[in-house]
Amino acid sequence: MKRTLGVLMDPISSINTSKDSTFAMLLEAQARNWQILYFEQSDLSLRDNQVIANCAELHVRDNSSDWFSLQHKAIRPLASMDAILMRKDPPFNMQYIYSTYLLELSGSLVINHPQALRDYNEKLATAWFPQCCAPFMVGADMQGLKDFIDQQKDVIVKPLDGMGGASIFRTSENDPNRNVILEILTEHGSNPIMAQRYIPEISDGDKRILIVNGEAIPYALARIPQGKEHRGNLAAGGTGTGVELSKRDLWICQQLGPELKKRGILFAGIDVIGDYLTEINITSPTCIRELDKIYGLNISARLFDAIEENLSE
């Protein structure tokens, strides 16, 4: 029997198909003869105790100038879908949270699990694995943050809800701009942020490692800062190169894998700099397309193997 996949994402008309991981997933679903139903956050509703969405049937093509077509738009219950990909990019705001409530009420298999999406802040989630992390602090207390910077000497500070390298600063005990950076990020001591000891191995790249159903893909995309930039994010101008996972990388993945799987996180992208875990990305992790191209992989196939395994249980 033909299976049905719902996909909640940003407008498909605006994606970059050469880099979009959701697009890779959709190509794999279509190759497996799944029916794909596309909708956005504003299409979700709860009516008569049933979660519904105004969906369109989606067909995709691996063609950078003509990659999709939509047809047969209609109201459909989410319970009729075998699985749903929650691939809405941040911001992680109240609209996003409301969407997770509705998805959880649907009764369908949602990747990743809506409760995990709400509970697992991508910066703070690293605190569950302190053995994998460099020294860090989370808080809004200005003096506490200054003391931490004085202690660690060289520090990265960033908001808890950012993505793509936005609002990430490097500061130090002697930085004349330190106070104003903290004032801006904490909104004068009212909003908690994360401070992490600077890891000089960023010069070798911020490695994005993909974990599927608790198991690591054996290669990472090292996003290397350019010039004097301290951020490796591709959105901030970094360049990506493929690297094989080190023994330490694999050890970190082994620490995380069982817990991610337990929480219903079938697809995660963790960030590792040097020997240290820095983030656990579960909202809409990327880098499938890049790693598939470099190493001749099909990471989405591993994901759909896991989805189909979950559905058959």
Image (spheres, grey):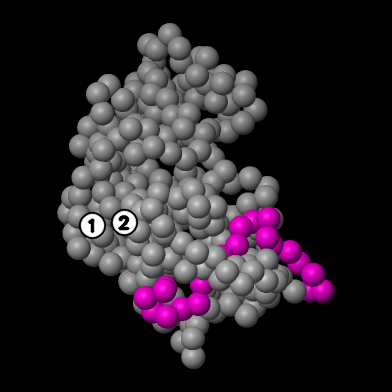
Q: Residue 174 appears in which quarter of the rendering?
A: top left
- Res. 287 in view: no
Q: Position of residue 73 (x, y in %)?
A: 64, 69
Residue 223 makes an appearance in the image: yes
**Residue 212 percent coordinates (x, y):** 36, 66
Which residue lies under the disc numbered 2?
289
Q: Is residue 163 left or right of residue 55?
A: left
Q: Is residue 30 magenta?
A: yes
Residue sitting nearer the eye, 115 or 302: 302
- Residue at image location 39% in from the left, 15% down from the top: 173
Residue furthest front as drawn = 66
Q: Is residue 311 above or below residue 227?
A: below
Distance Cα–Cα, label 2 vs label 1? 6 Å
The reply, left or right, for residue 160 in relation to residue 304 is: right
Q: Position of residue 39 (x, y in %)?
A: 60, 62
Dots 2 and 1: beta carbons under 8 Å? yes
Q: Is residue 304 left or right of residue 83?
A: left
Q: Is residue 299 left or right of residue 264?
A: left
Q: Tag 1: residue type? A: Lys
Q: Is 205 placed above or below 66 here?
A: above
Residue 293, numbered circle: 1
Residue at image location 38% in from the left, 24% down from the top: 170
